[in-house]
Amino acid sequence: MWVSGISEREVAERAGVNPGYVTRLVDVGVLAPDGDGTFTEGDVRRTRLYQGLERTGLPLRAIREALDAGELSFGWLDAPLYDLIAPLSQRSFRDVATETGIPLELLRVLREAVGFALPEPDDRMREDELRIVPLIRILVSRGFPTAVVDRLLRVYGDALRRIAEVEADWWHRYVVLPSLASGMTEVEMHETTLGFGVELEPLLEQALLAMYHAHQEHTWTENLIGEIEDALDRTGLRSRLIRPPAICFLDITGFTRLTEERGDEAAAELAARLTPLVQRPAERHDGKVVKWLGDGVMFHFREPTGAVVAALEMVDAISAAGLPPAHVGLDTGPVVFQGGDYFGRTVNLAARIGGQAAPGQVLVTQGIVDRVVPDGIAFEPIGEVELKGVSEPVLLHAVTR
């Protein structure tokens, strides 16, 4: 919310600086009060920015010279778009812990989870941090272990940090740099692109929330299907499926490292070359691509024999094309089709097995071995393997021709 008519003392409080620091900014000439001697919310943001710049070694007088020369401008911080930059509240971490009964150390995780240094107990909380407190409070009151809530906050923080970094990267590449390359000054670039940012920001939030809800639906469906399968197991109904399908996960070894070293364009080129090498064998053997993953593909096959043969063909084709080697995991059993995707224990197990396979290797369960006619195919037991998220060790076999 836009706020004007703020006193110098209030600027210091909201920015989390010593009142004398605001006076110094005014004296240097990088911060200017209105005619009535008051400041705006934009001045609070500028104060925090100047403090951060000074801490990185940039002197205020050099910043003043760049402002005077028209090479820099921080006027864009007055725009309501930047209301998302939360000011400091008047309540410390210790105060909120006392008021709510939330463990102090758990509250301090809030700031650390988004990449800032671990705060001191008497540091003031940000206004946006206070908006997360009700969630923590209800989880703690319902008996969730502190370690579980801690992990939740850190996962949220890490995932959203990555999203924010990607957004900032493409804004810099495709908005800022082209504007500067066209001959705009830094000041003109900010003034010109501000309108696009204002238009984009609510759409980004809308898209982010929509995708989050879709992920929730996907995950909730997986959990629900797991509960249904457990109920069918207890009644002996799950084992009555006569011709179960097969699920296959194929991953490319070193895909993540390749993307980091050579960039997104190299990853896109690899994906384009990979597509026909896996789609054609799958289609020849009654299979189909369910979805493309970050570093591989998930397939559904009508029956296990076709899945095994197709997996061997895909691994060979990828190797012959000179691409990084693939590794494959296969399982067979009941699956549930929902919303264009497949769910269930079989899917989860196949994914775990794929992660266990070595480069160029195809690993399968005993269920696959029991249902495949070994025409030119050999299965070599590699023993029982413990897989993450699977309660019992799983007997796996390596497939060869």
Image: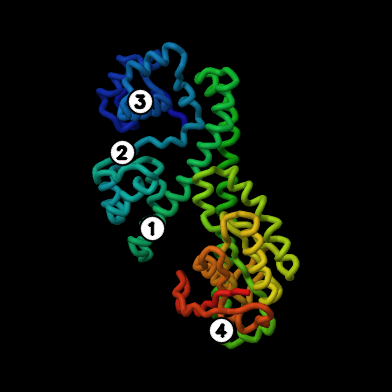
C-alpha separation, residue under disc 2 versus residue under disc 1? 27 Å
Residue found at the far top of this picture: 69
Disc 2 vs disc 3: Cβ atoms closer than 8 Å? no
Distance CA(mark 2)–CA(mark 3): 21 Å
Q: Are marks 3 and 4 in contact (CB under 8 Å)?
A: no
Query: Residue 252's spot in the image, x, y percent?
Result: 57, 58
Disc 4: which residue:
233
Residue in the picture at 64% in, 78% down: 377
Q: Which callout, 1 or 4, points at the residue further toward the start of the chain? A: 1
Give the percent coordinates (x, y) of residue 396. 52, 77
- Residue 337, image quadrant: bottom right
Residue for point 37% across, 64% down: 144
Separation (CA) of disc 4 from disc 2: 56 Å
Lower sequence index among marks 2 and 1: 2
Q: Circle 1 is placed at which residue position?
A: 151
Q: In the rendered image of this protein, does residue 341 appear above or below residue 206?
A: below
Residue hosting label 3: 50
Asked whether residue 82 appears in the rendered view, the answer is yes
The circle drawn on residue 72 is none
Q: Quadrant for the C terminus, please.
A: bottom right
